[in-house]
Image: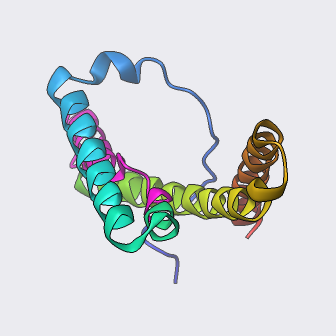
Amino acid sequence: MPNRLMPTSLMSVRANLSALRETRWYELALRILFGGLITVATGLIAQRFGPPMGGLFLAFPAIFPASATLVEKHVCEKKQRHGLDGKNRGREAASLDARGAAQGSIGLIAFALIIWRLLPDHAPWLVLIVATFTWLAVAVALWTLRRLL
């Protein structure tokens, strides 16, 4: 039985600059608000339990809660403009967005581990470069693995 949330064809990663025209000011404000609230919560966690615990929560994409709902809303609206019920496709798009956020978070955890282990003994600029490339490698590897499976 096919998975209902998986599209029948593979999706390609690409930039869609026309989506910027579809974004309303209050949607950007909502993303900034969610990002700010999550950043404050992370700061409070770090203050109470220490920087290592706070750092773990920074791996959570700060704008994901707003992003997932807005992705679903935009896809639904686009389908409805063409006379179709976009509810299922909107949910599919939000689930794909969630999968990408999870994969990116795993990459951010790898980034944090590199910073944590290497920063005390090495030049900060070099550690940041290594950590950034580690994040990129993990994220691309997960995306490639998911695509192959």
Q: Residue at x 71, y 52 (%)?
A: 135
Check residue 132 for magenta coloring: no
Residue 40 position in % (x across, y down):
27, 51
The stretch in magenta equals 57-85
Query: Is residue 18 found left or right of 78 in the rendered image?
Result: right
Residue 76 position in % (x across, y down):
24, 44
Q: Main secondary structure of the magenta part?
A: helix
Q: Residue furthest bottom?
A: 1
Q: Residue furthest front?
A: 120
Q: In which quadrant of the rendered image does the C terminus lie?
A: bottom right
Can residue 81 be seen at all in this image of the molecule? no
Q: Residue at x 68, y 62 (%)?
A: 116
Q: Nearer the viewer, residue 5 or 2?
A: 5
Residue 93 position in % (x across, y down):
40, 52
Q: How is the image coloured?
A: rainbow
Check residue 79 for magenta coloring: yes
Residue 3 position in % (x across, y down):
49, 75
Q: Nearer the viewer, residue 54 or 149?
A: 54
Query: How many numbered discs sit on the rendered protein?
Result: 0
Q: Residue at x 20, y 40 (%)?
A: 33
Q: Is residue 20 above or below residue 108?
A: above
Q: Nearer the viewer, residue 1 or 55?
A: 55
Q: Residue at x 26, y 35 (%)?
A: 32
Q: Nearer the viewer, residue 81 or 66?
A: 66
Residue 26's quadrant in the figure? top left
Query: Is residue 135 found left or right of 137 in the rendered image?
Result: left
Residue 103's quadrant in the figure? bottom right
